[in-house]
Amino acid sequence: MMKAARYLTIMMLVAALTAFTACDKQEDIDRSFTDYRYDIVTYLGQNEHGALFEYLGHGDSASIKLQSAIDISEEVKIWQRVLLRYDFANTQTSNPRSINVYGCNSIISDSLRYTMASPDSLIRHQVKLRSLWRTGEFINLHCQVEYTAKSRTFMLVADGTTLDNDTVHCYLTHDLRGETGTFWRDCYASFNVGILWKRDTFKCLRLHLNDVTYPEIVYYDFNK
């Protein structure tokens, strides 16, 4: 029994040393998987260096240009909003800032629309809200929607009867167009509401959601 115990102890020590050595020799994980940012930005087009983007911080923060070396001119239209996965190429805080792009995905990118129809007539299929925020003249949305294999309607629509009021009522219109939703999947959207933000009479954008995550909150206010 003593020999067996001693043998077992030695084997455990050898295994521990082997595991330590294996970990010590392991190569560093690629920074693109560990050090990056996710931001919704505006694609400004290509220049001699590559794709140029504009980043806007929360609220009315100043804009920052982001200079990359990639070419997405065939996939993305100028002024379209995209979800960018990237990291700063260096610590210099110049404008534009050089970045390394690890991923660039198209999202729902649209301008605010309006209707004179009753809000009750708008189709507002449910979503699962994750986050909702404003950057400059954009209202940005991260939510989950039920997947279908067909296209859908997903728009931010203002009640035309409130356009001249200090509070403009807007509704997230979500129409599956007769399709049946299955599993939930992530959805990102960005809506340009500058047409409202520039109005002298405008004070507040009240966004109405049909949200199953926080059903008790039926609207969110964005104050000018």
Image (cartoon, grey):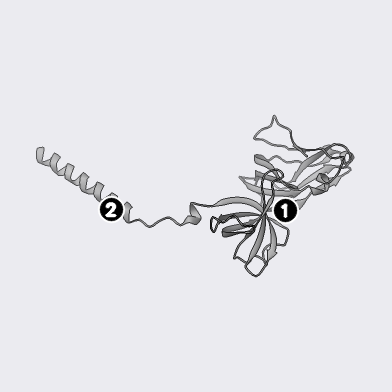
Number of numbered callouts drawn? 2
Amino acid identity at mark 1: Ser
Q: Quarter of the image holding residue 95?
A: bottom right
Q: Position of residue 184 (x, y in %)?
A: 62, 44
* Badge 1 density bin: few <14, some 14–19, many ≥20, Cα 10 Å: some
Q: Which residue is mark 1?
A: 109
Q: Which residue is mark 2?
A: 21
Q: Is residue 215 left or right of residue 21?
A: right
Residue depicted at x 83% and y 48%: 195
* Badge 2 density bin: few <14, some 14–19, many ≥20, Cα 10 Å: few
Q: Earlier in the sequence, mark 2 or mark 1?
A: 2
Residue 153 numbered mark, or none: none
Residues at marks 2 and 1 touching, judged by CB atoms closer than 8 Å: no
- The quadrant the N terminus occupies is top left
Amino acid identity at mark 2: Thr
Q: Secondary structure at mark 1?
A: strand
Q: Is residue 30 above or below residue 170?
A: below
Q: Quarter of the image holding residue 180?
A: top right
Say which of 184 and 79 sits in front. Answer: 79
Residue depicted at x 49% and y 54%: 33
Q: Position of residue 25 (x, y in %)?
A: 32, 56
Q: Is residue 59 left or right of residue 204?
A: left
Q: Secondary structure at mark 2?
A: helix
